[in-house]
Amino acid sequence: MSIVVKSINNPPYKGKLVDLMLSDDEIQEVEKVINDFDDYVLTPRQLCDLEMILNGGFSPLTGFLNEEDYNGVVNDMRLSDGTFWPMPINLDVSEEQAGKWEVGKEILLRDSDKFPIAILTVETIYKPDKAAEAEHVFGSPDDVCHPAIAYLLNDAGAVYVGGSVKGIQLPIHYDFTDMRYTPKELRAFLKRKNISKLVGFQTRNPMHRSHRELTLLAARKVKANVLIHPVVGMTKPGDVDHYTRVRCYQEMISHYPRDMALCSLLPLAMRMAGPREACWHAIIRKNYGCTHFIVGRDHAGPGKNKDGESFYDPYAAQELLNAHKEEIGIEALTFKMVCYVEDLGEYRTIDNIPEGSRVLNISGTELRRRLYKGISIPSWFSFPSVVKILRETYPPRNQQGFTLFFTGLANSGKSTIANAVRVALLELGGRTVSLLVGGHVRKHLSTELGFSKEHRDLNVRRIGYVASEITKARGVAICSAIAPYKETRGYVRELINKTGGGFVEIHVNTPLEVCEQRDNKGLYAKARSGELQDFTGISDPYEAPESPEVTVDTSVVSVSQAVHEIILFLEQEGYLSKQSI
């Protein structure tokens, strides 16, 4: 008896995957003249976009948007030929860079390691209306609480360059290489496995039991397999790093019925654009072979706006995708929030919970608190094996690294206190402790720097970088620098926070007149006489911290008292175990 296998009839968006890669022969010809090209090193976001263009994930796009396409996408979510496309894909460059190029010129696009990735043929060079782009695409002309608006207004180049691309090679990845399917490769896999229905699940967070139950609910509803398709390109600042997340996904796959779920990594740079992003994600999943796509509550939402309210209605993404799903050619699976019902011992959608039932949930904020405090995380919320992976990356605070950043005027006593705190922490033990004093860093890392504002900023930024590496390695970095400028201190705080460790700003708020009395080198006197220029506190301002974690004034407290206050703060915030105090 013969077996008839149901054929898979699920073409990519608009009928075919674009193939933009040069042949081997063409690449050999390019290599002969590769030094003749003008080249451009792509930013991380641009590299993600280029990879998605080249691998067919952004089909039918064949390059970065030209001006006419860009305007159509921003205003109407349509390319110039009428094709539905909700997200502008731009190559943004500086005015200086754009001034070196002209229409018709071929540009060699390289990654950060200078590997050649593609050749761009310039077709248009134009200045966008960024406020209009921000408002139409993201919902506000200027609210930088939205990460994409902040990037657009503060980081993106002033000029856009549109044009088609030809691929030399896809960007090189060294991690999880067996999980990085291109659309063509994933479609071939589905064909080999005779999978005719595939539900795509978008995620940028670790998966817990509620996510598993949601995907199983969707799979059972349409009798399909599940594609866990996490973004590993660029997500929202502060998200869990993709290395940790992928280990969680690998573990989660083992908790699905055999052969029901697979995981493939998506090298996408998210925009957190809510409704538009949901449609964009659906198009991408259509290209990867999905027949269905799950859109939950507040899909790709960026959080709160400047008024403390959500940027988008929680179900706006579902509504917009439902309006365009037939044109995209994918079924949208929309569900309400999934919660754990203690009385039933199972997960239910919030609209299917018996009245009076006790519903349990753990928010992202509460999960982070439990990780930081070492508090247990119940098995109804997440599998213990997944929690174990998260705890390895996010240990309790008393096992994390942290930075103590002392700032204050010259002769305020900050370096004396910093060294005394170093000794106290070494006495307690448990972590390596490194002291980074502004003068010492100048001697060993910044000998070429003077004392202009630019050079003082650069010295503090270097201190911050070294401290971030120490903090990342779960050590303690104690920094002591005048660091007079609020913006630079904020930069260091952000740099440390990105490591997952703690940042404690300590303002040594000793009065100026006391600092002058202690000055045995006569620097303040020279500054007042005009012999020294740009001297902090005299001829250059000191921007005092507005909300430091600790403030001490060495004119009224001793060094020992100051150290005691700092150690007590560290213990109170969980950086030190109570047993060691």
Image (cartoon, rainbow, N blue to C red):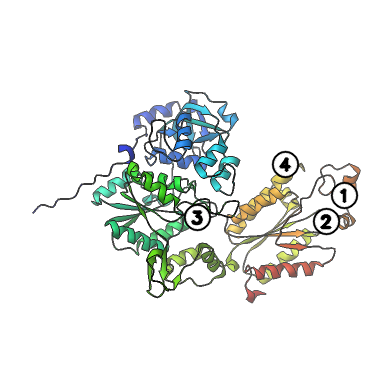
In three-dimensional space, the C-alpha distance between marks 2 and 4, rounded to whole angstroms, equals 22 Å
Residue 348: x %, y % from top left: 38, 66
**Which residue is label 4 attached to?**
454
**Which residue is label 2 attached to?**
411
**Which residue is label 3 attached to?**
241
N-terminal of the pair, mark 1 or mark 3, is: 3
Check disc 4 and give the amino acid type: Glu
Asked which secondary structure carries label 4, the reply is: helix
In three-dimensional space, the C-alpha distance between marks 4 and 1, rounded to whole angstroms, equals 21 Å
| Camera-side residue of 523 and 129 | 129
Residue sitting at x 59%, y 64%: 400
**Which residue is label 1 attached to?**
524
| Camera-side residue of 240 and 145 | 145
In three-dimensional space, the C-alpha distance between marks 3 and 2, rounded to whole angstroms, equals 41 Å
Q: Residues within 10 Å of mark 1 (few under 14, many from 20)?
A: many
Q: Residues within 10 Å of mark 3 (few under 14, many from 20)?
A: some
Q: Can residue 568 be seen from the camera position used here?
A: yes
The quarter of the image holding the N terminus is bottom left
Q: Is there CB contact under 8 Å for labels 2 and 1?
A: yes
27 relative to 223, above or below: above
Residue sitting at x 30%, y 46%: 187
Asked which secondary structure carries label 2, the reply is: loop
In three-dimensional space, the C-alpha distance between marks 2 and 1, rounded to whole angstroms, equals 10 Å
N-terminal of the pair, mark 2 or mark 4, is: 2
Picture quadrant where residue 558 is located: bottom right
